[in-house]
């Protein structure tokens, strides 16, 4: 006897440095009910606060891969990431390809130039006051964290680990670009030629990672523009998925 079920499309979301399972709540609430939003979470934060933080991208990716395996076996999905989450999403997708698992319909990345553009400054080794000054200058965490001393103390070891992972990351060129599209969206204030801004050329380098690059699309705001326009971001993510897939998939 054949049994058919409709698999809900999944949006697997990977937070920014210091982020946790609650980082995208304002966006998630605008996702329609025929799609499932899943925010993955690294050790050392949120619901995994008691676990040892990881300070290397390959270790983070291995952890995320184990988390998403049950989700990508069951139906269609896409991956969304912001800032550090784009780097993790990119490397996670490479691991999915290498493992010959079900591929995402598309990737949607915000707030970071291509993985080939490496972070040169070693902020993670700075003394605590200088570290926070650098984080403030680059807009590296949401304002509500920077304005709360208790939160700063809580986030300090987490962010240090995350920044170290980003700074030590070694880019390896893919043998073949992804066969599925990458959508890129940035805040207007984080793109330009000024210090701590990302250039259009650095963002367009995402085109080396896929056969189909869409963007960069610019939305009003700084590095955390996604939290200021959550409904717009949610609509764009859903549209990207629906452009690349039907909403239902049947399995025997």
Image (cartoon, rainbow, N blue to C red):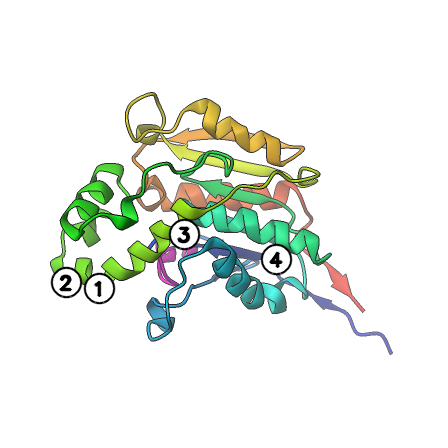
Q: Quadrant of residue 107?
A: top right
Q: What is the distance, in whole Å, between disc 1 and disc 4 at their CAs? A: 35 Å
Tell me the number on the disc at residue 9.
4
Tell me the number on the disc at residue 150.
2
How many C-alpha atoms fall within 10 Å of the one at disc 1: few (<14), some, or many (≥20)? few
- Please tell me which residue is depicted at 68% across the width and 61% down the height of the picture: 75
The reply to whether dot 2 and dot 1 touch (C-beta < 8 Å) is: yes
The picture places residue 183, in percent across and down from the top left corner, at 54, 37
- If you read the primary sequence from the N terminus, does the residue marked by circle 4 or circle 2 appear first? 4
- Please tell me which residue is depicted at 63% across the width and 54% down the height of the picture: 95
Q: Magenta residues: mostly which secondary structure?
A: loop
Residue behind mark 3: 165
Residue nearest the observer in this picture, 103 or 140: 140
The picture places residue 46, in percent across and down from the top left corner, at 34, 68
Q: What is the distance, in whole Å, between disc 2 and disc 3 at their CAs? A: 24 Å
| SS for dot 3 | helix
């Amino acid at each position: 006897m054949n049994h058919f079920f409709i698999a809900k499309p999944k949006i697997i979301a990977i937070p920014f440095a210091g982020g946790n399972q609650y980082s995208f709540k304002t966006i998630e609430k605008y996702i329609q009910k025929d799609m499932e939003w899943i925010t993955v979470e690294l050790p050392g934060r949120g619901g995994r606060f008691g676990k040892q933080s990881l300070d290397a991208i390959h270790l983070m990716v291995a952890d995320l891969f184990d988390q998403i395996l049950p989700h990508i076996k069951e139906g269609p999905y896409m991956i969304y990431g912001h800032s550090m989450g784009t780097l993790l999403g990119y490397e996670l997708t490479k691991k999915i390809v290498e493992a010959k698992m079900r591929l995402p319909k598309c990737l949607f990345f915000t707030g970071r130039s291509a993985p080939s553009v490496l972070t040169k400054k070693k902020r993670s080794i700075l003394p605590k006051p200088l570290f926070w000054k650098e984080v403030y200058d680059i807009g590296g965490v949401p304002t509500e964290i920077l304005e709360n001393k208790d939160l700063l103390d809580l986030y300090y070891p987490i962010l240090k680990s995350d920044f170290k992972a980003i700074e030590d990351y070694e880019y390896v060129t893919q043998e073949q670009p992804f066969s599925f599209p990458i959508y890129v969206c940035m805040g207007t204030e984080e793109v330009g030629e000024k210090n701590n801004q990302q250039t259009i050329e650095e963002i367009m380098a995402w085109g080396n990672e896929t056969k189909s690059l869409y963007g960069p699309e610019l939305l009003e705001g700084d590095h955390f523009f996604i939290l200021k326009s959550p409904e717009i971001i949610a609509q764009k993510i859903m549209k990207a998925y629906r452009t690349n897939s039907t909403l239902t998939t049947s399995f025997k």
